[in-house]
Amino acid sequence: MRSQSTPGPFLRPVRVTITIPYNAYQSLIERSNEQGRSLSNLAAYLLETSLQAIHSS
């Protein structure tokens, strides 16, 4: 069995738990409803695009 930090031939999503301020949560809920996507999908998208922006700077 591979550890979570050792990538295999296929990279699988990893589940994480975070604590965020209530206002951020409310904003995410509103935006996910407006876009018709799940909160999880929106949060993953925002994290990924933020990290890409940091690396391309």
Image (cartoon, rainbow, N blue to C red):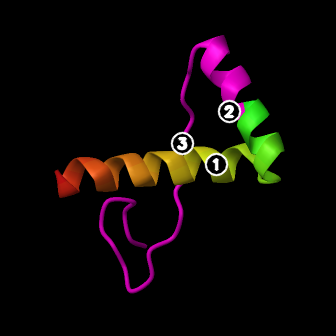
With 11 as the anchor, is 24 left or right in this view? right
Sequence-wise first label, 3 or 2? 3
Residues at discs 2 and 1 in contact (Cβ within 8 Å): yes
Q: Residue at 20% x, 57% y: name it.
A: 56
Disc 1, SS? helix
The spot of residue 35 in percent (x, y) is 77, 50
Residue 24 visible in image:
yes
> Which span is picked out in magenta?
1-28
Callout 2 environment at 10 Å: few (<14), some (14 to 19), or many (20+)? Answer: some
Q: Does the segment drawn in magenta span residue 22?
A: yes
Residue type beneath disc 3: Val
- Residue 5 is labelled as none
With 9 as the anchor, is 40 left or right in this view? right
Residue 15 visible in image:
no
Q: Residue at 38% x, 86% y: name it.
A: 9
Q: Residue at 38% x, 71% y: name it.
A: 2
- Residue 16 is labelled as 3
- Residue 42 is labelled as 1
Residue at mark 2: 28
Q: CA distance from mark 3 to mark 2?
A: 17 Å
The spot of residue 14 in percent (x, y) is 52, 56
Residue type beneath disc 2: Leu
With respect to residue 53, does 18 lie above or below? above
The part of the image, by quadrant, that contains residue 19 is: top right
Residue type beneath disc 1: Leu
With respect to residue 6, does 37 lie above or below? above
Q: Does the segment drawn in magenta span residue 27?
A: yes
With 1 as the anchor, is 39 left or right in this view? right
Q: Residue at 72% x, 43% y: name it.
A: 39
Front label number (3 vs 2): 2
